[in-house]
Each structure stands twice: as C-alpha cells, then as structure tokens.
Image: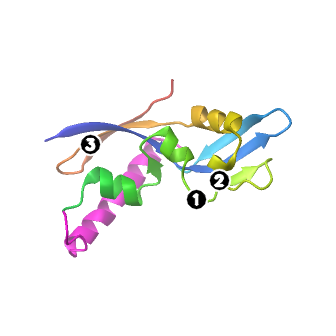
Amino acid sequence: MSIKIMNVFPMIHSITIDKENDLVTELVQDLHDADGVRANLLASVAEVKMYESINYYPLKKPEFIDDVMGSFAQMGLSRYITISDNTYHEINGYLGCTRVWELPVVLRDQVEKALVGYEVEYDSETWEILNITDTKE
C-alpha cells in the first residue's frame, strides 16, 4: 500500500455577483459534498481503468494524478487550477463574462477564497479512495 493525500477543489458551476458593490454573493461548485467527490473519483478511476484494459494507453501506464485527476474528474488540484478552468460558467450579475478568469481581480480573489476543497486519501498503487474530508477553514 502506498497511501497519499491530495487536495481537490470541485469545478465551478455558477456564480452570482453584486456588480455595484464588487461582491460575489453566491458560488456553486459542481460537487457539493464528500459523497459527490467520492462518486466522481470512483467513476473517473473506472473510466481510466477501462481505457487501460483495452490498451488505450500504449505508451505509458496510466497514473492516478495525471489520468484520473487531469483528464476525467470534475476537480482541480488547487484553487488556482479551478478558477483558471476554461469551461463556460454561469455568471450572473456580470454581463459578458462566461469564465471566472475573465472577472476583475477583486472578484476572482473572492471566488478563489470561497471555493470549498476536499482532502482525498488514496492508495496510489490500487487507486482505492480511502477517505475524503472537506477542508473548510
């Protein structure tokens, strides 16, 4: 067994902004709790292992972080990665912005601080998800 711990931050679903006061009033992430994070990771592991079983990775053996977290999970390994995500977001109250990184710095900083993260303990050899806890401060 090779136990490792990583922090993950679910991707952003929607943001509500009070533009007059430069305030983020609501942030909704794609995954809302440890059970959702676990389900997403288990589905991502199953998908990568399925690709491995059909020899979809001919050049190198899949790795948990690179292939599961980097390609399939709906999470980033840092707050910065999550706010830098290039997918379209539902941003209410700030017309013309469809991605978090397009917002002014004062709002991006608020989004970054509001993100809820999770500590994931896993076995890097078997890819078993052992424990998930939120990292609310």
Q: Is residue 137 positioned above or below 28 on the image?
A: above
- How far apart marks 2 and 3 lie (CA) works out to 31 Å
Which image quarter is the N terminus in? Answer: top left
Identified by mark 1, the residue type is: Thr
> Which segment is the magenta one?
32-60
Residue 33 place in picture, x, y as percent = 49, 42
Check residue 33 for magenta coloring: yes
Give the residue drawn at x 17%, y 49%.
Answer: 125
Q: Is residue 99 above or below residue 111?
A: below
Tell me the SS state at disc 1. loop
Determine which of the numbered discs, if any, sits on residue 122 in the image: 3
Disc on the earlier residue, 1 or 3:
1
Task: Name the disc covering residue 99, or none.
Answer: 2
- Which amino acid lies under the numbered mark 3 shown in the image of this protein? Tyr
Mark 1: few/some/many CA within 10 Å (<14, 14-19, 20+): few
Q: Identify the element where label 2 is drawn.
A: loop
Vertical side of 49 occupied by 123: above or below: above
Residue 123 falls in which quadrant of the image? top left
Q: Residues within 10 Å of mark 2 (few under 14, many from 20)?
A: some
Q: Which residue was labeled with disc 1?
A: 87
Res. 40 image quadrant: bottom left
Residue farthest toward the left in the current orientation of the protein: 1
Measuring 55% from the left and 51% from the top, which residue is drawn there? 30
Camera-side residue: 92 or 81?
A: 81
What SS does tag 3 mark? strand
- Which residue is found at the position 25% from the left and 64% from the top? 49
Residue 42 belongs to the span the image colors magenta? yes
* Badge 2 vs badge 1, beta-carbon distance below 8 Å: yes
Q: Is residue 115 left or right of residue 49?
A: right
